[in-house]
Amino acid sequence: MSAQKPKTIFEKIWDAHVVKRAEGYPDALFIDRHFIHEVTSPQAFDGLRQRGIPVFNIQRTTATADHNVPTKDQHLPIKEALSRHQVETLRKNCRDFGIELYDLGHPFQGIVHIIGPELGLTQPGMTIVCGDSHTSTHGAFGSVAFGIGTSEVEQVLATQCILQYKPKTMKIEIKGTLGKGVVSKDIILYIISKISASGATGFFVEYAGEAIQQLSMEARMTICNMSIEMGARGGLIAPDETTFNYLKGRKFAPQGEAFDRAVAKWKQLPSDSGAVYDSVLTFDAADIAPMITYGTNPGMGMRVTDRIPTVEELKEINEQKSFKKSLEYMGLEPGSALLGKPVDYVFIGSCTNARIEDLRLVASIVKGKKKAAGVEVWVIPGSKQVEQQAVKEGLNKVFEEAGFELRSPGCSACLGMNEDKVPPGKYCISTSNRNFEGRQGPKSRTFLASPLSAAVAAITGKVTDVREYI
Amino acid sequence: MSKDKFTILTSTAVPLPVENIDTDQIIPARFLKATTREGFGENLFRDWRYTSDNQPINEFVLNNAAFGGKILVAGKNFGCGSSREHAAWSIYDYGFRVVVSSFFADIFKNNALNNAVLPVVVSDSFLAVLLEAIQKDPTTPVTVDLVNQEISFAGKRETFEINAYKKECLINGYDDIDYLLSLNKEIREFDLSH
Ligand code: SF4
């Protein structure tokens, strides 16, 4: 008998979930955990009704309301009619089909990619999907997690499976240790700035190396979250003691002896030595500084101390046109620096950076200080649990004293589907993941950055190198 | 849901030579509040098509009467960004059946194929001449032949790749759920033993 071919963690998980592989057909992949929210699910439930079929396994499905929800007065009915209708439709669908819903006001409500991990629903070795591209967040636990469209949501509801071709694999290794003031958001913004917003299309990424292993679970989630911003199908990190410690005692994680058995299984997951990837990239942590984006895709990023490239410096000639259009939209000059640029809004939130550690980072900078005059600051916790923890630790007081308030959880200004919109032409430094045209409101202008960089900008009122401040 | 069948299409085409068109441009988030699949075409490329007080922006190609047809020809990395299927619905609802580009984002490609919109990947050079030709003469007919996997116009042609399973689905109007439902028994067993 020949020895088994060494496998990557991705291949191990994928292969263990193939229900049927047929020549010429995509794999029928079994899905362990399905998250749903109000925006991408209504048409899928309608599809089930049209076919007259139930949800395949309600135990594997969890719902929450996050995209449309107000971040003030959450106990009142949603004012905006269409948003209210979408949330009410979700309620009805969950009721009709018997699905657990963490609705507004529920202690477990929050952004879908924040509550899965904190409830222990997200576990190593699982396949996880959601009708939302940032489902890649859950890969931080060593799971195969990816975003799907509504037709696919319907597939999963109907059959607990999805038809998929196996993507190629890419390993991104970060060697060395991060410098002062540099956090996981900077790592991922750095990677995307190096390989572009489409640099990992068709790949499933595994992040590895010393700088990644040293990160906490929450910091790892920030990295995996943004995998999609370089086009990757998803991103994951092999589980280790950090992962197991995080999961231990969480509500839906295995308990007691079952937990120990699970850990023994999870320890088999990391890639075998000698496993082959379709692509391998290596970066040095020492090269990473606090990052900021200047354009309208997350690949248009730089060290905060750098200057925006000039048109002539672009690597690809055919990118010149979109580059110019992008800078025009942003109201920025090619070749100029961003340091010292005034900002109007600061948004601390989203599934990228609205966990408790993020709020602690922000509080560590603003404690005892006041926000700059004329800057509006929104701190939107990722979940009810994060909100409560922040209050317990007194972070809300720190924020209040600084002149900004801790609101209720939801996606908020990450995509501006609720009232929280950045007005036209205004600059917002944001801890979210997308700087697309109009993402935070029509004609809004977004600088993506880490919670540290956003916090320091709230105090100084302009783009600032956080390293000079700590 | 039964889908349109697709074999061969000849139509004029609409040029949109912009790269990295993301799903927020195709359909801005504020229009994602509907709970049905219809009516999204009205808001396709909304912020490029209309000013904030709803006046048509004349320079934008969809507002130019000279251009029309069922084929959209766009720059590289079309459909990047979010997984919202609304992007594919709005393109379909507007009346496009084909999007031609030299590169598509993964999720968009899948969503398009699930909604009877055929993404045709061509070489950068073919894309450039095609864009030039239709910009010069908006009446240029473009033919997309799915059976033979070939796109052609004005005597120029290029073959394109499409996955055999998806091709079969498009030609016959099948969808993925039909196939998965046929595996119900195997999936049940897997769920129990897993
Ligand atoms: S916070 Fe933003 S990126 Fe995350 S799920 Fe909500 S809308 Fe999507």
Image (cartoon, coloured by chain):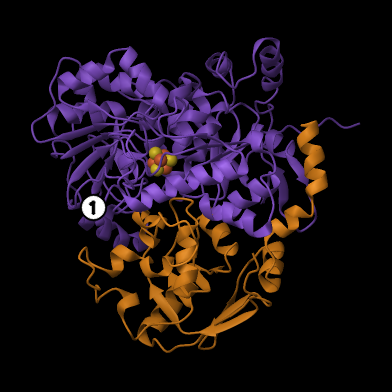
Chain colours: A purple, B orange
Place of residue A179 in the rendered image (x, y in percent of width and height, measured from the top left): 34, 21
Q: Is residue A169 visible?
A: yes
Q: Position of residue B38 (x, y in %)?
A: 48, 66
| A177 left or right of A120 in image | left
Which quarter of the figure has residue A234? Answer: top right
Kindly identify which chain the residue marked by label 1 belongs to.
Answer: A
Q: Is mark 1 within 8 Å of ligand 1?
A: no
In the depicted view, which residue is nearer to us: B45 or A7? B45
Q: Is label 1 in a helix, a strand or a loop?
A: loop
Residue B134, above or below B165? below
Residue A129 horizontal side relative to residue B55, left or right? right
Ligand 1 - quadrant of the structure image: top left
In x, y percent, where is residue B88? Answer: 49, 63
Kindly give the residue lying farthest to the top in the view shown.
A256
Position of the N terminus of chain A, as image quadrant, is top right
Residue in the image at 47% along x and 41% along y: A134
Residue ID at (14%, 26%) = A371
Is any atom of residue A281 visible in this view?
no
Q: Residue A393, relative to residue B65: is it above or below?
A: above
Kindly identify which residue carries mark 1: A310
Q: Amino acid at mark 1?
A: Thr
Q: Quadrant of the C terminus of chain A?
A: top left
* Image: A380 above or below B153: above
Q: Quadrant of residue B66?
A: bottom left
Residue A262, how many percent across, how many down?
69, 18
